[in-house]
């Protein structure tokens, strides 16, 4: 089906002739493609992408986040319900985060999480038929950077999902350039939320705006912008 | 089904509060700055697109001749229909359309004569200016963004026309306002309303001229009036219709009291100038010329805020 790759598709179209893996004879369908009995149906408008050996998905520019297992996201705790926290991750449904899913948390030793806190966490259950579930520990029970963030300042803001993917791409120079001259902490959630903490309020705002502005910029343009930004911040 | 709005986290709230205390705003504006306004007219008569900051509104005016109401035979009717798309905010309800119907006596619809329709006779244009208050009125912001509105203690909306008549005044929130503050706000509102009214009139005049030249031709005529951002520019002609971030005031003032307000704002801006240098790149990438009437920005302009000075 190599002829579909790179083409624009619309919801409802059926695709066929997928390239299978040589070992397992399987095809992996990513976001935007769905199997309905024997057909493969497109479920969102965009461009069909293919990755060796057998992965297919539809690429589009969207802001609405759909939970995916294994994604690291930034959520806002909206309420406490019994043993779980209900966390807003920007998806269609609130996700649950068990209070035991924190580093060194036990039945007696509850983690200190308040309503309105932001948490950096990972999805362990993300399924279209079930409530998504989050954790703040890895399989060894360590936090590894996950947990409550933003207690001591910093700013969180929302961008598009594409921008987040662009920033995280190893080819993107934005964070490297900013990091050369400014010291700041950043947490990037796959749901399009970013949390930034720099030394001062103005630096934080500057970095946040630089990131939002870089959405449609090439690496060259980003370099130019960062140079200006850093010069302006240094007071030239 | 009505969707939830994204909750505001403690982290954002604290950050916005501390930024306001620092006299800084997330989009790089000064406390008394309005967002950038851009007015564009469509090909057809009666259609107009307005951009205020990140918000875009499309307006379409249409008219028909009907029998006036029996009780008010000399008056026409005005209907206003507002459609809020759920694409704009998930908080807007899906599948329902909030209808607002206004029966007013302020606007009359003239009958369409032979060919050219006559413009509506708009007697005056009230314009709303919003003020947000923080920490019991200690800090004041003009034209707050949605996040700033979520954090504020209370707000005051002043509806005013260019004759300095207050048409509406609404105060919401849990705070007490002093008499001085209300007066101060109304003085700022006078300045903002004058600016915006002038801007709308300029845009309308330009549009009228452009249509005059191209009568009968189906040109794709998009006339835009871009209000330039002028953060640090001392040599500014008085009366240039520009609304932007920072900069000394170029407001036309003929009343002593307003001069005072303008001076006050100017001093605030001056004291912030050193800090502004820092935050300049953070929010605005516009250049410094304010007489431009086109909206084409070259790549260099976008990234050269200092070059043109």
Image (cartoon, coloured by chain):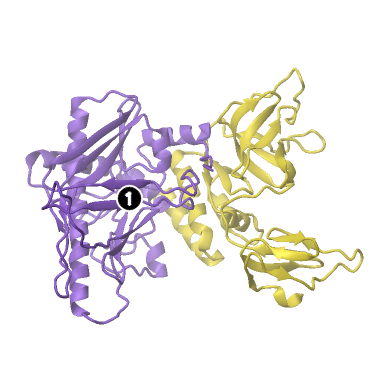
Indicate left or right for B252 with A15 as reference: left
**Quarter placement of the C terminus of chain B:** bottom left
Quarter residue A5 falls in: bottom right
Disc 1 target residue = B35
Nearer to me, B89 or B155: B89
Pointer 1 chain: B
Element type at marker 1? Answer: loop
Colour that chain A carries in the picture: yellow
The residue sitting at the front extreme is B70
- Whether residue B238 is visible here, answered yes or no, is no
Q: Which residue lies at the image location 25% right of the left edge and 44% below the top edge? A: B128
Chain identifier matching the purple colour in the rendered picture: B
The answer to whether A139 is drawn above or below residue A80 in the figure is: below
Looking at the image, is A7 positioned above or below residue A60?
Answer: below
Query: Residue B193: x, y in percent?
Result: 20, 47
Q: Quadrant of residue A97?
A: top right
- At a point 69% along the width and 28% down the height, the residue shown is A84
């Amino acid at each position: 089906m190599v002829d579909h790759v790179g083409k624009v598709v619309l919801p409802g179209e059926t695709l066929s002739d997928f390239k299978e893996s040589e070992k397992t004879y399987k095809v992996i369908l990513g976001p935007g493609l769905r199997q309905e009995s024997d057909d493969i149906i497109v479920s969102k408008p965009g461009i069909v992408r293919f990755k060796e050996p057998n992965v297919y998905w539809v690429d589009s520019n969207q802001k609405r986040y759909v939970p995916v297992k294994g994604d690291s996201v930034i959520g806002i705790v909206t309420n406490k319900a019994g043993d779980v926290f209900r966390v807003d991750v920007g998806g269609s449904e609130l996700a649950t985060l068990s209070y035991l899913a924190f580093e060194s948390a036990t039945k007696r030793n509850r983690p200190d999480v308040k309503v309105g806190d932001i948490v950096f966490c990972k999805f362990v259950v993300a399924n279209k038929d079930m409530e998504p579930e989050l954790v703040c520990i890895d399989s060894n029970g360590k936090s590894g950077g996950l947990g409550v963030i933003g207690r001591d300042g910093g700013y969180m803001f929302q961008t598009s999902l594409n921008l987040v993917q662009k920033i995280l791409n190893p080819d993107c120079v934005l964070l490297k350039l900013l990091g050369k001259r400014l010291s700041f902490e950043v947490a990037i959630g796959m749901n399009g939320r970013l949390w930034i903490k720099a030394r001062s309020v103005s630096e934080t705002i500057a970095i946040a705006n630089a990131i939002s502005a870089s959405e449609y910029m090439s690496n060259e343009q980003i370099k130019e912008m960062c140079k200006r930004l850093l010069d302006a911040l240094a007071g030239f | 089904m009505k969707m939830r709005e994204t909750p505001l986290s403690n982290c954002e709230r604290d950050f916005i509060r501390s930024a306001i205390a620092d006299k800084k705003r997330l989009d790089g504006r000064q406390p008394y700055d309005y967002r950038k306004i851009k007015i564009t007219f469509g090909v057809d008569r009666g259609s107009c697109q307005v951009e205020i900051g990140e918000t875009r509104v499309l307006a379409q005016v249409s008219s028909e001749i009907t029998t006036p109401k029996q009780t008010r035979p000399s008056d026409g009717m005005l209907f206003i229909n507002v459609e809020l798309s759920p694409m704009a905010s998930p908080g807007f309800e899906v599948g329902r359309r909030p209808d607002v119907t206004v029966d007013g006596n302020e606007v009359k619809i003239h009958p369409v004569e032979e060919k050219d329709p006559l413009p509506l006779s708009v007697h005056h244009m009230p314009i709303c200016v919003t003020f947000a208050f923080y920490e019991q009125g200690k800090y004041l912001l003009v034209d707050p963004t949605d996040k700033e509105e979520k954090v504020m203690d209370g707000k005051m909306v002043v509806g005013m026309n260019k004759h300095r008549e207050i048409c509406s005044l609404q105060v919401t929130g849990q705070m007490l306002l002093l008499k001085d503050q209300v007066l101060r706000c109304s003085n700022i509102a006078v300045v903002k309303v004058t600016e915006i009214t002038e801007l709308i009139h300029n845009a309308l005049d330009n549009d009228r001229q452009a249509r005059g030249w191209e009568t009968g031709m189906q040109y794709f005529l998009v006339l835009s009036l871009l209000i330039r951002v002028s953060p640090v520019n001392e040599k500014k002609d008085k009366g240039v219709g520009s609304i932007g971030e920072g900069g000394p005031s170029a407001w036309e003032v003929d009343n002593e009291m307003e001069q005072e307000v303008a001076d006050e704002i100017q001093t605030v801006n001056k004291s912030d100038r050193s800090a502004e240098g820092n935050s300049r790149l953070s929010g605005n990438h516009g250049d410094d010329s304010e007489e431009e009437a086109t909206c084409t920005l070259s790549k260099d302009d976008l990234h050269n805020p200092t070059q043109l000075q």
